[in-house]
Amino acid sequence: MSKTESKESATDKKDLNQFEQHYFNSYDHYGIHEEMLQDTVRTLSYRNAIIQNKDMFKDKIVLDVGCGTGILSMFAAKHGAKHVIGVDMSSIIEMARKIVDINGFSDKITLLRGKLEDVEIPFPKVDIIISEWMGYFLLYESMLDTVLYARDRYLIEGGLIFPDKCSLHIAGLEDSQYKHEKLSYWQDVYGFDYSPFVPLVMDEPIVDTVDAHLVNTTRCKLIEFDLNTVQLSDLSFKVPFKVEAKKQDWINGVICWFDIVFPAPKGQRPVEFSTGAHAPYTHWKQTVFYLKDDLEAEKGDILKGKLICSPNANNNRDLDIKIQYEFKATGVDAADRSVKNENKYLMH
Ligand SMILES: C[S@@+](CC[C@H](N)C(=O)[O-])C[C@H]1O[C@@H](n2cnc3c(N)ncnc32)[C@H](O)[C@@H]1O
């Protein structure tokens, strides 16, 4: 980093640990922002929510936490905000400055480089916080921590957060072919036994798009967060789940996804979107956790258990996830098909 850059940033990258440096470097390149901008479900939901609430934005001071290319700041400025402060630690903010300038918003948007936790914002309080902080499996990247910091430090009493509600969901999944291809590959690699890799494959959740017809159980809401009130400690949790097989099929793993809801004017339907397999594509796709067992399900069988999630102690942007599960089969062969087990995962 050049001297000028480090002087311009409230945070000197050299002071950040290797994980933080890596994290912010990942947002330096335009490619990741292109992917996010092109995710129309994501980006248009923010725009629609701001337009739906334009009376709330009128003449308000708005803080855009992690402004990236400045898209949300410009939506807010275009639809009535008095002033928007966009903060980002990554060098992409230098592009945001150009974009904001050529689109004629320089007098309405102030862009500050640095970690939100380190910058000095030119207003003691803000009326509204906007942020696109969601990671895979909702909480990966732990950027919600920064939004909660911004809320507690800057948001006026009764101020709004866009979005303000989110929830995580789970269901059973038939994925025999892909799972077995992925695992059996390691049994014979050019004639050698590579099976010690199998547990590593099992311990990693897979982020991918899943065909909705492969989801073969009812779905269950694991947890929901209200951003107006949620505390940092709530982001480590142990929650129960229970789903029911919809047909005779294998259950090889579980699929998780999240839903997002924005504030809405009284009496109006809020803007919301889902990242589930049943919903239109988003760049968050879905997250698949393979179970140690392939469960032989009959319609009506129950898969229940607990999902335990917390930031990883070594790198808090990673997630430690454990799924304890109990499959309760019914019928004459119930004892043979019933299983109780658990698997640990690291999302990194
Ligand atoms: C998911 S991107 C969203 C970018 C933009 N708001 C958009 O919607 O296209 C999150 C951005 O937040 C920034 N960010 C994450 N944590 C931050 C922090 N603590 N302080 C400043 N910027 C942060 C990242 O550098 C990244 O550019």
Image (cartoon, rainbow, N blue to C red):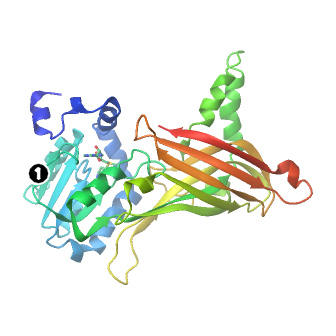
Q: Position of residue 165 (x, y in %)?
A: 41, 65
Answer with the quarter of the image where residue 60 lies: bottom left
Q: Position of residue 85 (x, y in %)?
A: 16, 56
Residue at 68%, 32% (x, y): give it: 183
Residue at 68%, 61% (x, y): give it: 243
Residue at 44%, 64% (x, y): give it: 273
Foreground of the two, 144 or 190: 144
Q: Position of residue 264 (x, y in %)?
A: 34, 75
* Crowding near the residue tagged with mark 1, few <14, some 14–19, many ≥20 C-alpha atoms within 10 Å: few
Q: Amino acid at mark 1?
A: Asp
Residue found farthest to the right: 332
Foreground of the two, 324 or 26: 324
Looking at the rendered structure, the secondary structure element under dot 1 is helix
In the rendered image, the vertical position of residue 115 relative to residue 303, given as above or below: above
Q: Position of residue 167 (x, y in %)?
A: 48, 62
Q: Is residue 186 left or right of residue 149?
A: right
Residue found farthest to the bottom: 267
Q: Is residue 178 left or right of residue 19?
A: right
Q: Is residue 202 visible?
A: yes
Residue found farthest to the front: 233
* Residue holding disc 1: 101
The quarter in which the N terminus is drawn is: top left
